[in-house]
Amino acid sequence: MKNQFALGLMAILLLASCATSKNSTSGWVSIFDGKTFNGWKVNEHPETFSIQDGSIVANGERAHLFYTGPLADHDFKNFEFKAQVKTMPNSNSGIYFHTMYQDEGWPSKGYEVQVNNSHSDWRRTGGLYAIDDVKEAPAKDNVWFTEHIIVNGKHVQVLIDGKKVVDYTEPENPERPEGMKDRLISDGTFALQGHDPGSKVFFKDIMVKVLPD
């Protein structure tokens, strides 16, 4: 009996050790609690963003919701970002990275990863807006999809439901469109975009994995 008890205890400890190891090495951290805007800050039109059924909803006048929470002191360089996203028909939004809080306007710093499956703007979900665009929508309206952004050094990858739609390496001395001179790899936080009153987009299960510099 003692031997059986010892073997059973060892098995339990081994399973617990494996579970702990898996959790500690996965590296993914949730940055949205599903209930509040703790760790987030909205700029010019706060009413554009709301929380419904565990999701952030962007619907209203132009506004941006910036992550200001404790993870990496909201200053990311190399990372993986993953969120569940759902677009309503004719809706436009975006996910910014390497950006910083500003009181109004379209964020001037960092890249925008497009969220748009059917809006009149032809640039579709997953593209690096005006830098490496996607022309064919890789996801559908009214259906949850996973938007996964990986940045490592100058290399940016975007995957939609596991399918790679962007694989971009920023060149030396990149040329940028007018008004986008700071659309560059650097460091900074994330922001979700509220584009216009006719657009309605949902975000949930927002996770980040910090990668080594």
Image: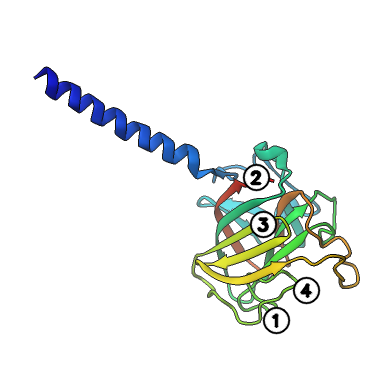
Give x and y (percent) for residue 132.
72, 74
Q: In the rendered image, which residue does mark 4 sit on?
A: 130
Q: Nearer the viewer, residue 146 or 33?
A: 146
Give x and y (percent) for residue 55.
55, 53
Circle 2 — which element? loop
What whole-number distance in Å separates the C-alpha atoms at marks 4 and 3? 18 Å
Question: Which label sits on residue 212?
Answer: 2
Label 2 sits on what residue type?
Answer: Pro
What whole-number distance in Å separates the C-alpha atoms at marks 3 and 2? 11 Å
| Residue 183 image-quadrant placement | bottom right
Question: Which label sits on residue 151?
Answer: 3
Q: Nearer the viewer, residue 68 or 76?
A: 76
Which of the two labelled residues, at mark 1 and mark 2, occupies the earlier sequence position? 1
Label 3 sits on what residue type?
Answer: Val
What whole-number distance in Å separates the C-alpha atoms at marks 1 and 2? 35 Å
Q: Give the residue displayed 71% in from the left and 55% down from the top.
A: 153
Question: Which label sits on residue 58?
Answer: none
Which of the two labelled residues, at mark 1 and mark 4, occupies the earlier sequence position? 1
Q: In the rendered image, which residue does mark 1 sit on?
A: 122
**The N terminus: image quadrant:** top left
| Residue 30 image-quadrant placement | top right
| Residue 128 image-quadrant placement | bottom right
Label 1 sits on what residue type?
Answer: Trp
